[in-house]
Image: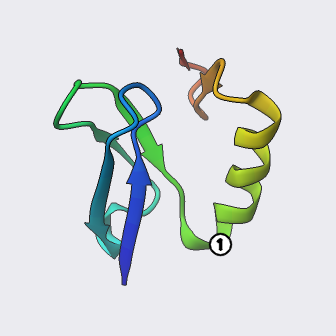
Amino acid sequence: MQIIAKCPECCRTWQFDSSAADRRIRCRKCGRLFKVPKPDEVPKAAEVIERAKGTIYVDEAGKTYG
């Protein structure tokens, strides 16, 4: 399964295999660290992103980005 993830900093789109799910990935273009959700978390992640409108992202460890 392929996962397509978009960096919240530079908006570059990346393709990963399923092993990237539920991991934090560093963008190869800008270096920002962002989390790739598990496939069953995608609806919830989309809802959080829609509510946040890309202003601030807080990961499960409490680190903030944005």
Q: Residue at x 46, y 43 (%)?
A: 35
Q: Quadrant of the N terminus?
A: bottom left
Instruction: Choose between 14 and 44: the one closer to the eye.
Output: 14
Q: Nearer the viewer, residue 15 or 37?
A: 15
Residue at image location 77% in from the left, 41% down from the top: 50
For the residue labelled by badge 1, is the local secondary structure a helix, a strand or a loop?
helix
- Callout 1, which amino acid? Asp
In this picture, residue 13 sits left or right of residue 42: left
In the rendered image, residue 10, in percent from the top left (x then y), is placed at 35, 28
Residue at 42% x, 63% y is 21
Q: Does 58 sit above or below residue 7?
A: above
The quarter of the displayed image where residue 14 is located: bottom left
Q: Most extreme residue toward the bottom, as rendered?
A: 1
As drawn, is 35 to the left or to the right of 14?
right
Q: Is residue 49 above or below residue 31?
A: below
The residue carrying mark 1 is 40
> Looking at the image, which residue is at 32% across and 41% down?
12
Q: Position of residue 33 (x, y in %)?
A: 35, 30
Task: Name the side, left or right, on which 44 lies relative to 29.
Answer: right
Image quadrant assignment for residue 51 = top right
Q: How many marks?
A: 1
Tell me residue 25's x, y (percent). 31, 43
Classify 35 as above or below 5. Answer: above
User: In the rendering, at what x and y percent does residue 39 appear?
Assistant: 57, 72
- Which colour assignment does the render follow? rainbow
